[in-house]
Image (cartoon, grey):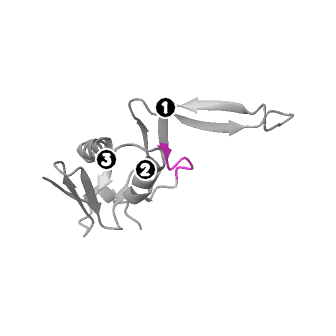
């Protein structure tokens, strides 16, 4: 006999604190998020895929406007992984604060949120 429990309903010590005035997101390492796809205004993700005859002078460029987290659908992604990905894209802190807030509002962040 087994029971499946939605992680969103578990009480955890996971916490996220947002300080909008200072544009800060502070979180404990155990904050989990559900698999998500995020589109961010004005940001593009470019990947290089070599054609069948790859050359450094002629790569194939793919542009995307979404950040995919958990592309293998394994679950258990940490919010810190997402923030790291956003920082690599040079997303500014104000947008990161807004993204974290929206993710929490839709129930994708499995933690207690303190929003100042």
Q: Look at 16% across and 49% down and name the residue there.
A: 21
Asked whether disc 1 touches disc 3, contact meaning CB atoms under 8 Å apart, the reply is no
Q: Is residue 99 above or below residue 24?
A: above
Question: Residue 40 placed where, x, y %?
Answer: 39, 34
Q: Look at 50% across and 50% down and name the residue there.
A: 70
The residue indicated by pointer 2 is: 87
Q: Is residue 89 above or below residue 52?
A: below
Q: In this orientation, which residue lies closer to the viewer: 11 or 5?
A: 11
Depth check, mark 1 against mark 3: the one in front is 3
Q: Look at 84% across and 34% down and name the residue there.
A: 52
Image position of 27 (left or right of 66): left
Q: Is residue 72 above or below residue 78?
A: above
| Structural distance between the alpha carbons of marks 1 and 2 | 15 Å
Q: Residues within 10 Å of mark 2 (few under 14, many from 20)?
A: few
Q: Name the quadrant containing residue 13.
A: bottom left
Question: Residue 15 placed where, x, y %?
Answer: 24, 63
| Structural distance between the alpha carbons of marks 3 and 2 | 9 Å
Instruction: Tell whether position 34 is magenta.
Output: no
Q: Earlier in the sequence, mark 1 or mark 2?
A: 1
The residue indicated by pointer 3 is: 93
Q: Name the quadrant containing residue 76.
A: bottom left
| Mark 3 element type | helix
Q: Earlier in the sequence, mark 3 or mark 2?
A: 2
Q: Quadrant of the N terminus?
A: bottom left
Q: Look at 39% across and 51% down and name the residue there.
A: 34
| Structural distance between the alpha carbons of marks 1 and 3 | 18 Å
Q: Residues within 10 Å of mark 3 (few under 14, many from 20)?
A: some
The residue indicated by pointer 1 is: 65
Q: In this orientation, which residue lies closer to the viewer: 21 or 115?
A: 21
Q: Earlier in the sequence, mark 1 or mark 3?
A: 1
Q: Which residues are magenta?
A: 68-73
């Amino acid at each position: 006999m087994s029971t499946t429990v939605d992680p969103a309903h578990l009480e955890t010590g996971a916490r996220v604190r947002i300080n909008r005035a200072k544009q800060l997101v502070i979180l404990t390492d155990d904050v989990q998020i559900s698999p998500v796809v995020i589109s961010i205004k004005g940001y593009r993700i470019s990947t290089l895929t070599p054609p069948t005859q790859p050359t450094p002078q002629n790569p194939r460029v793919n542009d995307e406007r979404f950040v995919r987290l958990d592309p293998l659908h394994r679950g258990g992604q940490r919010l810190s992984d997402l923030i790291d990905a956003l920082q690599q894209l040079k997303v500014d802190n104000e947008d990161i604060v807004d993204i974290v807030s929206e993710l929490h509002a839709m129930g994708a962040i499995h933690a207690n949120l303190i929003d100042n």
